[in-house]
Image (cartoon, helix red, strand yellow):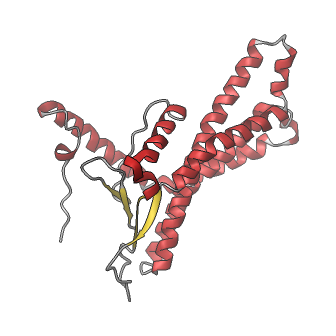
Amino acid sequence: MEIVRPSCEETMFPEYSNKTLKILCSLHDGLKELYLFCLNYEAYVALLVFIVNFFHFIVLTRKSMRSSSINWIMAATAITDMISQLWPLFWGLAQIFAFFYPCYSKKTAYLIYFLDNLFTAIDSFSRRCTTWLSLSMAFIRTLVIRNPLKLHYDNLTKPKAAFIVVVIVGIACLPLGIMNYFWRAIIEEEGVEECTGNGTSGFEYYTETSAWFADNDMLVYNIYYYLEGVFFKIIQPVQSIHSGATSAVFSKNASPPVTRTQF
């Protein structure tokens, strides 16, 4: 049976109507198509970014470059950028695996969901670190350049200052990274049989918002997103609804998503 998905006019921008609604839905659909097009090449771009940052790290940690705190912070930023590419690289490898082995076991399906949750949390953590490391680097440069005659600011250019900055940023970003991991619970799909022969594995597992996030009128969920918005994105973050590789199903009361992943 073919699944009929609701159109943009039926689900998006309920406060608008007529011409404005058509314009917004046209923009939404166009951006969605562009996003899905880019998503097909995400793993290739991630691999390129990983290689570039690896060479960036090698250059910045050469002996002649180690005396500056800015270079050490840039090297740490290169590491966090490489770490943030692990999630798209993982999905690229997972899709290759599913292509050659379409009939994988339930244990393998669970492992894929577990690694997806893990790499998603790591990606979220590393991106926050990158943001604050870049901001701290700009802040140190500003202080040193604006106060060239004040010797105590010169300490900010030492490698020790970079170590302190990296540790503080890592500790500050870690709690939300841990919360991001426990955001999703892996649920076993009922009534799904493992494929045999040349069949394709179905939805043996799916992820949904964990009880810890959803309980108490989604208290932890709201705390997480307000902290994320205030401290890491300045404005309230907007969640993207992935379709194609992933599809998210929302209830009418705007509860957190249930995500089912299929190759």
Figure check: 141 above or below 173: above
Residue furthest front in the image: 216
Q: Nearer the viewer, residue 170 or 24?
A: 170
Q: How many marks do you count on the picture?
A: 0
Q: Nearer the viewer, residue 215 or 99?
A: 215
Look at 23% across and 42% down and name the residue there: 12
Residue furthest left in the image: 18
Lateral position of residue 229 relative to residue 25, left or right: right
Figure check: 131 above or below 125: above
Q: Nearer the viewer, residue 184 or 35?
A: 184
Lateral position of residue 148 relative to residue 199, left or right: right
Residue 210 visible, this angle: no
Residue 51 pos. (x, y %): 65, 51
Lateral position of residue 172 relative to residue 222, left or right: right
Instruction: Locate residue 165: give its quadrant.
Output: top right
Look at 58% across and 43% down and name the residue there: 127
Quadrant housing the C terminus: bottom left
Residue 73 pos. (x, y %): 73, 36
Residue 53 pos. (x, y %): 66, 46
Look at 26% across and 44% down and name the residue there: 29
Look at 56% across and 57% down and name the residue there: 119
Instruction: Locate residue 62: give its quadrant.
Output: top right
Q: Nearer the viewer, residue 65 or 259?
A: 259
Figure check: 173 above or below 214: above
Residue furthest bottom in the image: 197
Residue furthest top in the image: 149
Quadrant housing the N terminus: bottom left
Residue 121 visible, this angle: yes
Figure check: 19 above or below 130: above
